[in-house]
Image (cartoon, rainbow, N blue to C red):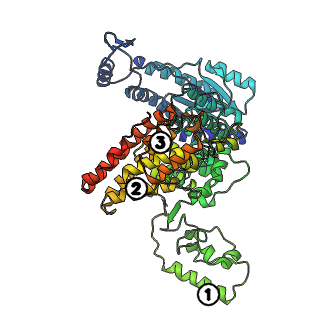
C-alpha cells in the first residue's frame, strides 16, 4: 500500500511544480517457463514442482482419469510469485544502476536523490521519468536488454503512457517511442485508482458494481437473517476495505455501499420491498451495545486510515521521507496542520488526526516528541489545563519539551507575571527539574490494547462507543441457532411484525388477534393471549412452577429462578452457573418458538421474511366461553385435555407438535440440572409425564 501512497505524492508534486512527468505502466507476460538465467539447482526444483501432482476432471459426479503435470506452474501455487520476484527484481537493479550513471532520471529529484523512478510490486510496475527524450530512449533500450537477458516479455501493446502537465502531441510522441497506447487518469495501480488530483464520485462506481456482482450470486430465499449478516461482514463489508485503507470515502460513496448492504439484509436476494425493522445506526452497533454486529463503514474507514499516522511516527520508508520534505514536518505529528495546496489524501489524513491522538500516548525520554503544554507528561492532565492563565498569555504554545529544556524554560509572555502567576511558573520549574529525562528519543505507545501497538480493531472499538444500549449478551451466548438469536433480539426490541406494528407501518388489515378479540401486540401474542397462556401453563405444570411469565423480562427471570431451585437453592460454581444459563436460554427459546412457530410448526403460522414475523390468517377465533375455560385452566394448572377437544383441529395439531419440541428441550434442561446437583429424580420426575398431553378427540 505504501507504493500507492508514494505514487500519489509523486504525481501531485509534479503537477503543482508544473513539471512534465512521463508515467509508463508496464504489462508483463506471466510466462515463467520462458525465464532464463537461473542456477541449475533452482531449475531442477522448479521442474520437479511443475511435474509434481496430478489433475483430473469431474463431470456429472464422475471422476475422470488423472493427468500428470509436465509444465507450467499450477494456479495458486506459492512458487508463482516467488519465480516472478526472482526475475522482476533484476529489472529494479538495472534501473537503479542506470540512475546512478545518469542514464535515466526519476521524478521529484529535488526531494529524493536521483528521484523516484520505479515502483514495483510483483507484476504491477510503474516507471516515472522526467521529460527527456534521450533518457526515455535509454529506458527503452534497457527494457529490450532486460527482455533478452531474462527471457520475460513485456507487452508494450497493453502498456500505457500518461503525461503529467503534458500536451497531447508530446504524449503521442512518447507513445510511439515506447510502442504503447495512451492512457488517462486515474490509472489502476495495485487494484486502486491513482490520480494527481482528488478522485471524483464517478471513479468509485466500479467498486459499487463489484459489490453488486457479488449480490447477484446470492439471490436465494434459503438464507436466514443470521446468514445474511455473516455474508455482509465477510463479503460486502470486506470488499471496499482495501480501498478504505488509503482513501477517506465521501459520505455519498459510503451511502451507496450501505444501501446495498441494507437492501441485502432486510430484503435478501428478492426484489420485493420489505420493512427495515431497525435503524441502520443501531444495526451497525457492536453486539455488546445492542446492535447486530455489522461493521460501520465510516468508523472502519477512519480506523484503517489512522494506521498511516502510526506508520509515520514509528516506521521509516520512502513515503515517510517524501511527506516530511514535502509538507515540512518532522516526527512530531502535533505540529502537522492543513495548508492550501496539500494533496487530498494528506488533507484527509489531517482530518482524522485528532481521533488518532485520542489513543496515542507519548512516553517522555528526551522530549523530542512531547508538547510542553498539550501533552500529559508531568501530571495526569496537560499543563494548559492545570495552568490556563499562563497558557493563555504564553507566546509559544506549541513548543516541545526538548526545545524548552535547551532554552532553560525561557518563555515569552504577553504581559508581566503578577505574584500568583510567578508562583505557578516557579512550580512548573520545580516539576521540570525533578523529572528524570533520558538521552533516548520519546516513545509512542497505543493506550488501547495489551500490546501497546496500534490496531485497527481497538481504534474501531473506540469510535463505536456511542453509548451503551441494551445488552443482549444472554442471547448471543446461548446454545441456540444464530437465526433464532436474531429473532429473540428483534423480539426484545419490540420490532417484529405483529399486527399492531404493521398498522403503524401503514398496513391495511385487521389488527385484532386471530384467536381472540384483543389487539395483537408482541406482549399479547407471546404472553397474554388465552391460547398462549395455556402453553405457558402446561410448561409450568410440568416443571412444578406456581406462576407463569407475563413479559420477556419475566420470562428470563422465571426460567432462572426455577433452575436455581433445581440446583440446591441456587448454590453452584460460576462455571456451572454459566453452563446452566445457556440451558435456560435454550429452554425459554423453545417455548417462544412454540408460540411463534414457522412454516406451520407453531401456534401461529409464520413465514420467515428476512427474520420478520409475518402472521398469516390463523384459525377461526375462539368463542368467548372457550376463552374463559382456557383462562380458568391456565390459572388453576388443571389438565386441559378435555377443554382442548373443542378447539379447531388445526390448532390442536399445531399445539401438539410445538409442545413436543418445547417439552423435549425442558426435559433436557431438567435432566442436566438433576445430574449436576444430585437431586432425587423420583421427586421431580413425577411431573415429566405431564408433558405428554393427548390433543384432539
Q: Quadrant of the C terminus?
A: top left
> Dot 2 corresponds to which residue?
545
N-terminal label among 2 and 1: 1
Classify 329 as above or below 24.
Answer: below
Classify 84 as above or below 331.
Answer: above
> Dot 3 corresponds to which residue?
643
Q: CA gap, disc 2 to disc 1?
A: 73 Å
Q: CA gap, disc 2 to disc 3?
A: 21 Å
N-terminal label among 2 and 3: 2
Which dot, 1 or 3, sits closer to the camera?
3
Q: CA gap, disc 1 to disc 3?
A: 90 Å
> Dot 1 corresponds to which residue?
423
The kind of secondary structure element at disc 2 is: loop
Observer-nearest of 582 and 434: 582
- On the image, the x and y values in percent for residue 161 come to 64, 25
N-terminal label among 1 and 3: 1
Amino acid at each position: 500500500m505504501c507504493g500507492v501512497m508514494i505514487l500519489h505524492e509523486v504525481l501531485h508534486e509534479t503537477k503543482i511544480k508544473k513539471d512534465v512527468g512521463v508515467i509508463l505502466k508496464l504489462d508483463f507476460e506471466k510466462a515463467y517457463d520462458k525465464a532464463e538465467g537461473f542456477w541449475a539447482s533452482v531449475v531442477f526444483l522448479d521442474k520437479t514442482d511443475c511435474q509434481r501432482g496430478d489433475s483430473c476432471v469431474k463431470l456429472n459426479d464422475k471422476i475422470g482419469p488423472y493427468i500428470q503435470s509436465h509444465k507450467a506452474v499450477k494456479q495458486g501455487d506459492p512458487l508463482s510469485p516467488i519465480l516472478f520476484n526472482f526475475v522482476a527484481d533484476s529489472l529494479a537493479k538495472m534501473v537503479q544502476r542506470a540512475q546512478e550513471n545518469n542514464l535515466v532520471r526519476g521524478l521529484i529529484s529535488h526531494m529524493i536523490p536521483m528521484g523516484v523512478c520505479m515502483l514495483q510490486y510483483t507484476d504491477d510496475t510503474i516507471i516515472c521519468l522526467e521529460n527527456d527524450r534521450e533518457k526515455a530512449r535509454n529506458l527503452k533500450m534497457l527494457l529490450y536488454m532486460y527482455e533478452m537477458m531474462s527471457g520475460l516479455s513485456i507487452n508494450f501493446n497493453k502498456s500505457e503512457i500518461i503525461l503529467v502537465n503534458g500536451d497531447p502531441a508530446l504524449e503521442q510522441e512518447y507513445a510511439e517511442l515506447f510502442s504503447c497506447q495512451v492512457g488517462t487518469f486515474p490509472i489502476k495501480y495495485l487494484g486502486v485508482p491513482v490520480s494527481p488530483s482528488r478522485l471524483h464520485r464517478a471513479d468509485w462506481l466500479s467498486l459499487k458494481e463489484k459489490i453488486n456482482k457479488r449480490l447477484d450470486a446470492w439471490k436465494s430465499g434459503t438464507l436466514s437473517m443470521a446468514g445474511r449478516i455473516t455474508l455482509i461482514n465477510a463479503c460486502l463489508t470486506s470488499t471496499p476495505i482495501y480501498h478504505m485503507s488509503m482513501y477517506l470515502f465521501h459520505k455519498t460513496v459510503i451511502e451507496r455501499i450501505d444501501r446495498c448492504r441494507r437492501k441485502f439484509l432486510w430484503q435478501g436476494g428478492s426484489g420485493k420491498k420489505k420493512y427495515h425493522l431497525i435503524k441502520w445506526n443501531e444495526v451497525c452497533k457492536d453486539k455488546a451495545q445492542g446492535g447486530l454486529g455489522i461493521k460501520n463503514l465510516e468508523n472502519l474507514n477512519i480506523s484503517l486510515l489512522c494506521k498511516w499516522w502510526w506508520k509515520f511516527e514509528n516506521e521509516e520508508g520512502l513515503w515517510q521521507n517524501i511527506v516530511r520534505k514535502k509538507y515540512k514536518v518532522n516526527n512530531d505529528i502535533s505540529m502537522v496542520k492543513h495548508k492550501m495546496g496539500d494533496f487530498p489524501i494528506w488533507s484527509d489524513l489531517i482530518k482524522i488526526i485528532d481521533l488518532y491522538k485520542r489513543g496515542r500516548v507519548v512516553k517522555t525520554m528526551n522530549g523530542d516528541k512531547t508538547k510542553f503544554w498539550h501533552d500529559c507528561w508531568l501530571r495526569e492532565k496537560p499543563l494548559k489545563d492545570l495552568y490556563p492563565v499562563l497558557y493563555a498569555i504564553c507566546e509559544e504554545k506549541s513548543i516541545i519539551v526538548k526545545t524548552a529544556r535547551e532554552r532553560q524554560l525561557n518563555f515569552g509572555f504577553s504581559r508581566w507575571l503578577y505574584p500568583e502567576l510567578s508562583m505557578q511558573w516557579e512550580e512548573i520549574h520545580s516539576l521540570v527539574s525533578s523529572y528524570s529525562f533520558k538521552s533516548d528519543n520519546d516513545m509512542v505507545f497505543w493506550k488501547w490494547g495489551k500490546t501497546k501497538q496500534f490496531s485497527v480493531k481497538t481504534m474501531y472499538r473506540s469510535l463505536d462507543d456511542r453509548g451503551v444500549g441494551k445488552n443482549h449478551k444472554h442471547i448471543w451466548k446461548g446454545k441456540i441457532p444464530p437465526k433464532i438469536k436474531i429473532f429473540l433480539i428483534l423480539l426484545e426490541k419490540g420490532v417484529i411484525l405483529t399486527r399492531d406494528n404493521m398498522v403503524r407501518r401503514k398496513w391495511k388489515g385487521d389488527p385484532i388477534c386471530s384467536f381472540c378479540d384483543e389487539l395483537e401486540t408482541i406482549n399479547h401474542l407471546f404472553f397474554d393471549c388465552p391460547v398462549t397462556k395455556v402453553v405457558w401453563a402446561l410448561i409450568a405444570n410440568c416443571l412444578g412452577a406456581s406462576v407463569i411469565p407475563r413479559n420477556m423480562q419475566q420470562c428470563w427471570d422465571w426460567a432462572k429462578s426455577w433452575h436455581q431451585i433445581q440446583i440446591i437453592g441456587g448454590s453452584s460454581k460460576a462455571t456451572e452457573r454459566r453452563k446452566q444459563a445457556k440451558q435456560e436460554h435454550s429452554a425459554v427459546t423453545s417455548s417462544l418458538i412454540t408460540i411463534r412457530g414457522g412454516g406451520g410448526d407453531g401456534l401461529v403460522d409464520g413465514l420467515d421474511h428476512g427474520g420478520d414475523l409475518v402472521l398469516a390468517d390463523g384459525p377461526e377465533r375462539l368463542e368467548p366461553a372457550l376463552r374463559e375455560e382456557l383462562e380458568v385452566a391456565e390459572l388453576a394448572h388443571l389438565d386441559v385435555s378435555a377443554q382442548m377437544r373443542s378447539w379447531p383441529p388445526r390448532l390442536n395439531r399445531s399445539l401438539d407438535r410445538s409442545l413436543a419440541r418445547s417439552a423435549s428441550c425442558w426435559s433436557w434442561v431438567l435432566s442436566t440440572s438433576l445430574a449436576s446437583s444430585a437431586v432425587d429424580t423420583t421427586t421431580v420426575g413425577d411431573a415429566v409425564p405431564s408433558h405428554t398431553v393427548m390433543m384432539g378427540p
